[in-house]
C-alpha cells in the first residue's frame, strides 16, 4: 500500500471511535463533527495564540466581541446593542442588559474596558485591530467610551475583534477562558483538535448543536473520506481536484468561493539580496502567476496583482498585472551582481493555505529558470510566524485577507509608519518615507471617497517598491453533509457557530 494510502487509512481508523460518539440515531443532543486541515495557533488571549484569521474564527465559538460582522461582513450589534458617535473620534457603546460570562457572572462595562485596555497594554493577538484606540473608559454599568487617536472610520468594524473577558481575569497568566460566546471550550489537544460545549449562559438563541468537535486531519484525502463515509459532518480546505467528485454525491454540498485571501511572496528589503530593487523586480518578472493557478490550483484561483480583492476600499482597478519576462529577469539579476546558481530559501507554511507547499514548489521551479536555486522550507504555521517575527526570512509565502474590507489594515499591520509598529508583522523590514506620508494622509481623512483615493495611491506606491509580490487569490471550499448540517455560509466561508445548525428531518 502506498505511503499516502497508509496514512489516509490509519487516520480513518483513528477517527472511527470519535465519529461514533454522539451519533446515535434519535438522540436529542446533536454533535457537530468537523474535520479540519489545521489546528488553531492557540486560544485567545493566551500564548501561543497568534494574529491569524483561522485562529480568530475558531475563538469566536467561545468568545464574543463588542460588535460583530454579519455574513456580508457588515457591522451588526453583538455584546454592544447600541452605539453613538458624538464626534469623529469617539464611540459610546451600550452593552445588552443581562449579559453573563460562561461561569454565570454578569458582564459590565468594566469588563469591556479592561479587555480592550489589556489588548493594547499587554499586546494581545488582537492588538493590530485596536491600535488606533487612544482611551477607553467606563461611563456607567452598561456604557463605555472608546476614543481614537485620530478620526478612524474603520474602528467600529475592528471592534469585531474586541473580545470581552472578565476584568478580574485579564491580568492573570494564563487568562482563564470565560467568555460570552455560544459555546465553551471543553478541551484542546494541540495538533489533534478541540471541542466546544454549549454555553448555558449565552445571551443569544441557543446554538443548534450541543457539542462541536474539531479534529485536525492534515491529509486532504483522509479528511474528505471522513465526510464521504459519514464519519464527519464537514471538512474545510477542499482541494480543487476533489470538487467534481464531491459535487456528484447527492448527500453532500460543496460551498465554493472566489475568496478574499491573496497569497504573496514577502521579500526582506532591508538586507541583501532584496535590498537591491533590481533583485525584487527580477523575482517579480520571473514568476508566471497563470501557471500557478493552472498547475497547482487547477484553474480554480485567480491571478493577483495587489493585496486587496475587488470591492475593498483602496483597490486599484487600473493597476496592471506583473508581466512574465524571464529574459529581463536574468538581466536584472546580473546587474544586481547575483550570479546563476545563487541559493535562496523560500519559507512558508504547509498547513495554512490551499496547496501552500505545492505553490512554493512551483515558485521554486520557476525561479530555477532564471538561475536561482531555491530550497523550499515548509514549516508548521506557528513556527513560520515565529520565524517572521524574528526577521529570519529573506523570502517567504504568506497570505492576506481583507477581513474588514478596508485597505488601511495592510499598512497598519504589514507596513506601519515609524513609531506605530506595535502589533505589526513587518516581515519585509520596509521603511519608505513617501509611503508613510501617503498612509498618514489616508489615516487623517474622514471623507470616505477621498480616503479611498489616497489608499489607492498607497497601493500604487507599494506596487512600485515590491516588498511583497502578489501571486494568486486563493479559492475557498468547504464540503458538508446536508443530511446532518444546514449552513448559511458567510462570504468568507468561515465556520461560524451562528451560521451552522442541524439539518431538519431524521439524522442518519
Image: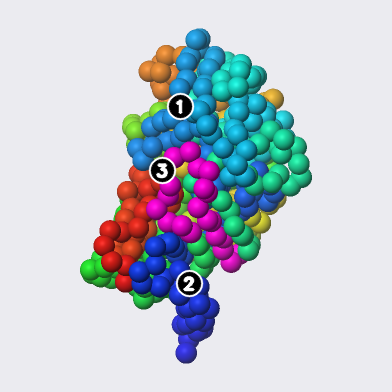
| Numbered circle sitting on residue 21 | 2
Q: Nearer the viewer, residue 59 or 412?
A: 59
- The percent coordinates of residue 303 (x first, y second) are 36, 48
Quarter holding the C terminus is bottom left
If you read the primary sequence from the N terminus, does the residue marked by circle 2 or circle 3 appear first? 2
The magenta segment:
191-212
32 w.r.t. 284: above or below: below
Mark 3 to mark 1: distance in Å?
A: 15 Å
- The percent coordinates of residue 96 (x first, y second) are 49, 28
491 w.r.t. 313: above or below: below
Instruction: Determine which quarter of the picture holds residue 171.
Output: top right
Residue at (42%, 49%) from the top-left corner? 207
| Numbered circle sitting on residue 389 | none
Element carrying mark 2: loop
Q: Does 77 sit left or right of 135 as displayed?
A: left
If you read the primary sequence from the N terminus, does the residue marked by circle 3 or circle 1 appear first? 1
Mark 2 to mark 3: distance in Å?
A: 25 Å
Mark 1 to mark 2: distance in Å?
A: 38 Å
Asked if residue 327 shows in the view, the reply is no
Residue at (58%, 53%) from the top-left corner? 185
Q: Is residue 414 magenta?
A: no
- The percent coordinates of residue 15 (x first, y second) are 50, 75
Q: Which residue is mark 3?
A: 205
Residue at (53%, 65%) from the top-left corner? 216
Q: Residues within 10 Å of mark 3 (few under 14, many from 20)?
A: few
Is mark 1 in CB contact (under 8 Å) with mark 2?
Answer: no
Asked if residue 450 shows in the view, the reply is yes
Element carrying mark 1: strand
| Numbered circle sitting on residue 81 | 1
Amino acid at each position: 500500500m502506498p505511503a499516502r494510502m497508509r496514512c489516509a487509512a490509519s487516520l480513518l481508523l483513528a477517527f472511527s471511535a470519535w465519529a461514533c460518539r454522539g451519533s446515535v440515531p434519535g438522540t436529542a443532543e446533536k454533535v457537530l463533527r468537523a474535520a479540519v486541515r489545521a489546528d488553531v495557533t492557540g486560544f485567545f488571549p493566551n500564548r501561543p495564540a497568534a494574529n491569524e484569521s483561522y485562529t480568530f474564527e475558531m475563538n469566536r465559538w467561545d468568545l464574543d466581541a463588542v460588535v460583530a460582522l454579519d455574513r456580508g461582513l457588515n457591522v451588526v450589534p453583538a455584546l454592544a446593542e447600541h452605539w453613538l458617535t458624538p464626534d469623529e473620534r469617539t464611540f459610546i457603546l451600550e452593552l445588552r442588559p443581562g449579559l453573563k460570562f460562561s461561569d454565570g457572572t454578569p458582564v459590565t462595562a468594566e469588563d469591556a474596558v479592561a479587555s480592550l485596555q489589556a489588548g493594547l497594554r499587554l499586546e494581545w493577538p488582537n492588538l493590530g485591530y485596536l491600535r488606533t484606540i487612544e482611551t477607553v473608559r467606563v461611563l456607567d454599568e452598561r456604557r463605555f467610551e472608546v476614543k481614537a487617536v485620530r478620526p478612524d472610520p474603520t474602528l467600529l468594524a475592528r471592534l469585531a475583534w474586541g473580545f470581552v473577558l472578565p476584568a478580574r481575569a485579564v491580568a492573570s497568566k494564563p487568562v482563564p477562558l470565560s467568555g460570552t460566546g455560544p459555546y465553551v471550550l471543553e478541551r484542546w489537544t494541540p495538533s489533534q483538535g478541540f471541542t466546544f460545549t454549549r454555553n448555558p449562559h449565552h445571551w443569544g438563541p441557543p446554538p443548534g448543536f450541543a457539542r462541536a468537535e474539531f479534529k485536525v486531519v492534515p491529509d486532504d484525502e483522509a479528511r474528505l473520506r471522513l465526510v464521504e463515509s459519514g464519519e464527519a459532518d464537514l471538512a474545510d480546505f477542499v482541494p480543487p481536484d476533489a470538487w467534481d467528485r464531491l459535487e456528484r454525491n447527492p448527500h453532500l454540498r460543496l460551498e465554493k468561493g472566489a475568496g478574499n485571501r491573496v497569497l504573496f511572496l514577502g521579500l526582506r528589503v532591508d538586507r541583501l539580496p532584496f535590498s537591491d530593487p533590481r533583485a525584487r523586480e527580477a523575482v517579480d518578472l520571473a514568476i508566471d502567476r497563470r501557471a500557478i493557478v493552472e498547475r497547482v490550483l487547477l484553474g480554480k484561483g485567480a491571478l493577483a496583482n495587489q493585496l486587496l480583492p475587488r470591492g475593498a476600499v483602496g483597490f486599484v482597478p487600473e493597476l496592471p498585472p506583473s508581466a512574465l519576462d524571464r529574459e529581463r529577469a536574468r538581466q536584472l539579476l546580473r546587474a544586481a551582481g547575483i550570479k546563476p546558481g545563487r541559493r535562496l530559501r523560500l519559507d512558508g507554511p504547509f498547513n495554512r493555505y490551499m496547496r501552500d507547499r505545492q505553490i512554493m514548489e512551483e515558485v521554486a521551479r520557476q525561479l530555477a529558470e532564471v538561475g536561482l536555486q531555491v530550497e523550499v522550507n515548509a514549516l508548521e504555521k506557528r513556527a513560520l510566524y515565529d520565524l517572521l517575527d524574528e526577521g529570519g526570512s529573506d523570502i517567504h509565502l504568506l497570505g492576506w485577507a481583507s477581513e474588514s474590507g478596508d485597505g488601511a489594515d495592510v499598512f497598519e499591520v504589514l507596513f506601519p509608519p515609524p513609531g506605530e509598529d506595535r502589533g505589526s508583522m513587518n516581515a519585509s523590514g520596509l521603511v519608505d518615507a513617501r509611503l508613510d506620508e501617503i498612509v498618514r494622509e489616508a489615516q487623517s481623512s474622514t471623507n470616505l471617497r477621498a480616503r479611498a483615493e489616497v489608499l489607492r495611491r498607497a497601493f500604487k506606491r507599494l506596487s512600485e517598491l515590491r516588498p511583497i509580490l502578489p501571486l494568486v487569490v486563493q479559492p475557498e471550499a468547504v464540503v458538508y453533509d446536508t443530511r446532518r448540517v444546514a449552513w448559511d455560509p458567510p462570504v468568507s466561508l468561515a465556520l461560524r457557530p451562528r451560521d451552522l445548525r442541524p439539518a431538519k428531518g431524521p439524522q442518519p
